[in-house]
Amino acid sequence: MINDFFDSYALALENGDIKQIINHFNFPSTIISGDFSNVFSEPSRLEGILSQSLRFFRQLGIANIKAEVWNNHFWTQNVLNVKVNWKYFDGLKQPVYNYDYQYVLKQDKNLRWKIILAVSINEKERVEELMLKIKAK
């Protein structure tokens, strides 16, 4: 169930399908990292952030994205906390980098899971490490 949700989300990211990515979010939804916090009240605001991420993936040659669900637990009957490790691979299926997120998902009126909160645990640090590796080459 939750693995299917994140597999679908990963496939949408991999395909660069912003509309499908957006379908995984509730509005409003919140995204938080160490130096960024934003509430997205409408899809168009989130689309801009996603477009930047997708360009970054293309620049890195990302061809495959896998979401590995590490754990999940229900806070209520229709609210779920999920920890995910995102893994990014190049066209040869070689790992490029990975990072962790914590999500809070809530079922909508049609009982579909939607992200209401996404918290980056170490994305910024992992991207900085990757950029240092690229510069060292």
Image (cartoon, helix red, strand yellow):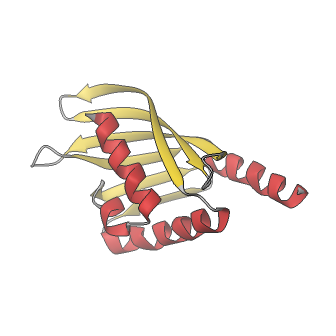
The residue lying toward the viewer, choosing from 126 and 67, is 67
Quarter where residue 105 is shown: top left
The residue lying toward the viewer, choosing from 7 and 46, is 7
Total label count? 0
Q: Residue at x 86, y 60 (%)?
A: 135
Q: Residue at x 63, y 51 (%)?
A: 92
Which quadrant of the rendered structure holds the N terminus? top left
Quarter where residue 21 is shown: bottom left
Q: Position of residue 58 (x, y in %)?
A: 59, 67
Name above or below for residue 46 compared with residue 127: below
Q: Residue at x 56, y 50 (%)?
A: 33
Whether residue 118 sits left or right of residue 29 in the image: it is: right
Most distant residue in the front direction: 92
Q: Position of residue 100 (x, y in %)?
A: 55, 39
Name above or below for residue 95 compared with residue 15: above
Name above or below for residue 136 compared with residue 102: below
Most distant residue in the left direction: 110
Q: Position of residue 23 (x, y in %)?
A: 27, 59
Name above or below for residue 108 compared with residue 100: below
Q: Residue at x 42, y 62 (%)?
A: 15
Q: Position of residue 137 (x, y in %)?
A: 88, 57
The residue lying toward the viewer, choosing from 86 and 30, is 86
